[in-house]
Amino acid sequence: MPANPYNGFTDYGIGLGLRVPHYDHILSEKPTVDWFEIISETFMVDGGRPLEVLDRILAQYRVVQHGVSLYFGSADDPDRAHLKKLKALTKRTKTPWLSDHLCWGSVDGTYSHDLLPMPYTFAAAKRTAEKIRMVRDYLELPIAVENVSSYTEFHVSEMTEWEFLAEVVELADCGILLDVNNIYVSSKNHGFDPYDYVNNVPHHRVAQMHIAGHTKFEKYILDTHDHPVLDPVWKLYAHAIKLCGVTATLLEWDDKIPSFQEVHDEALKANQFITEAREAKIPAPKKTSRVRVR
Amino acid sequence: MAAKSKDSKAAVTKAPARVDSTRALAALQRAMWGLVSQPLTAANRMKPRTRDGRSTAAAAAEIAKPNDRLTSFERLEIYNRMYWFRVLDSLYEDCPGLRAVLGDAKFMRMAEAYLQKYPSRSFTLRNLPSRLEKFLREEPKWTRPHTALCLDLVRFEWAQVEVYDGGAKPLFRVEDLAGINPAKVRLALQPYLQLLQLDYPVDDFLIAIKKREALLRGDASNAPTRVRTSKASKVPLPRREKCAVAVHRMDGRIYFKRLEPAACKVLLAIRAGKPLAQALAAGLPRAKSKQLEWAGKVQSWFCTWMQLGWFCRRE
Ligand SMILES: [Fe+2]
């Protein structure tokens, strides 16, 4: 959804992920880009080139922080030292909102550096929401949680992934970073209809969207972020913005990264769907609250 | 951070039948992590047996639902492979020198043993090699017969990580000396600056390896492949030769600078918080007759170090 409490009432357009191979191009050519998404962890350092580049980017562009290691879904408590570093970075970037994933990835203080899928249970949702609230209260920023792509499901799950997402964001009263590609990837891996997912998330909470490319293997699809966006993902995206309203959108391209221009051109393809959605003059999504299946 | 559970070191925790509490959530995560973090087989597949001898397929079946294409084992195997590929790739990138000495196959076996003993305890992969020196000191079998060389390389490669994004403080200026007795002044070094006393000239070795890797990739060279291959032949291992090197940075780039042994001692004493007069005494000969000869030298060292911005204000 456009400006809402979960993206700090901003109305950002199409953004790009800030990646090392593009640093020189961006700093020398200063291309017009609506906003950049940075991976927080890359800049949670004490100095050196990462912060020098960041400061130069911040002087010219709007930046939103996206993280990969808060692990809202890990049973462990949040790490205070980590949060302190993260907060210092948010002061530097003035990010209007902050996103990280609806997943787990650390166990008893050991890190997997992966985004591992959640068991979809009420107790897991409660714990996850509690941690999101802790982080939000500490950082004093709106939080959006991103659905991940996954390759397994759990016997213990008590609901669908989208019901779990809705349960978490309502308990935490936070936003959603809707990754349309991840929904598509998981739908193929787990055999659900991706439109059921998009239709059933609380649309008024969508703070931002992700689009990306993926890779098909014989028995599953892997979320590789190393391709242009595939057609079914664009279609799902078009459907999502009709339901959620035109929302800050970011193209993720993290591997086999082509030239800056190529990545930017791919991202700007979203404009076609944004124009259609604007022309359709769809009213803003209503606040919904989930009927508990409990 | 949650207290380290007693059974986190235990082979594989059993998965709970329900996740109806945070404790059960933790148990499920430990059970899955137990399988995902197990080393792969030589063919990069998930091991058929867990550390405690159980069938991995049975353990996986308690956690993951199969689907019409993949078994529970195969579904968790995707994560098992992704975990090891990610951490091993990261360490591989961080240690070109160590790799060159050990060879890729031996390096990978060592890396796997290291990551089992010291899995990541940091939110960032940057810190993955932080305990590698400790590990290699504890288990020299991985680096024999080149243990001393490998230890120098590991320290040097870690120093580069620290220099790349270490903190910098406001520069110390000559004006800051106003009104203080110069002999009693305590200077401070930039936190990012790394000072290494080495048994092997690994700085030159690493530069040679970098050049070789660039040649192999074909960077900055139009030479035909055959010429490239011959030029890129294996870099000979360095001979034992004590040296001191500062690893530092300028404009975001990392540089190595050889230091005279005495200069390195002075800098290390400054870093240890010694007042200037004592720091100089730590590095210079005591004999009065030599002092004049050294005065010029010391002056030029300090001049260079100031120019490189190595001194910062004390807090
Ligand atoms: Fe994403």
Image (cartoon, helix red, strand yellow):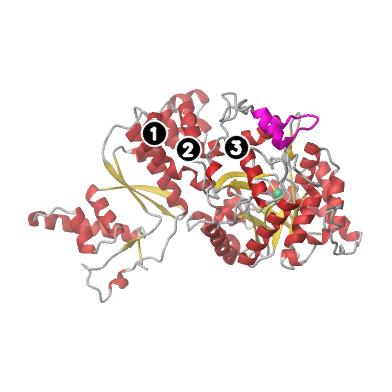
Q: Quadrant of the C terminus of chain B?
A: bottom left
Q: Is residue B169 left or right of residue A179?
A: left
Asked whether the beta carbons under mark 2 and mark 1 sit within 8 Å of each other, the answer is yes
Q: Is residue B150 visible?
A: yes
Q: Mark 3 is on which residue type? A: Gly
Please tell me whether mark 2 or mark 3 is closer to you in this view. 3
Q: Residue at x 79, y 38 (%)?
A: A190
| Alpha carbon distance from label 2 to label 1 | 11 Å
Q: Nearer the viewer, residue B126 or B81?
A: B81
Q: Which of A73 and B133 is in front in this view?
A: A73
Asked whether the beta carbons under mark 2 and mark 3 sit within 8 Å of each other, the answer is no
Asked whether the beta carbons under mark 3 and mark 1 sit within 8 Å of each other, the answer is no
**Residue A279, quarter of picture:** bottom right
Q: In which quarter of the image is the N terminus of chain B?
A: bottom right
Q: Residue at x 50, y 44 (%)?
A: B128
| Alpha carbon distance from label 3 to label 1 | 24 Å
Return the residue at label 2.
B117
Q: Which disc is residue B139 wearing?
A: 1
Q: In this view, does A171 lie to the left or right of B81?
A: right
Give, as a single range, the part of the protein colored magenta. Answer: B56-73
Q: Is residue B283 left or right of residue B217?
A: left
Q: Mark 1 is on which residue type? A: Glu
Which secondary structure, mark 3? Answer: helix
Which secondary structure, mark 2? Answer: helix
A230 in relation to B270, above or below: above
Q: Nearer the viewer, residue B312 or A139?
A: A139
Q: Residue at x 16, y 55 (%)?
A: B294
- Same chain letter for marks 2 and 3: yes
- Chain ID at mark 1: B
- Chain ID at mark 2: B
Return the residue at label 3.
B34
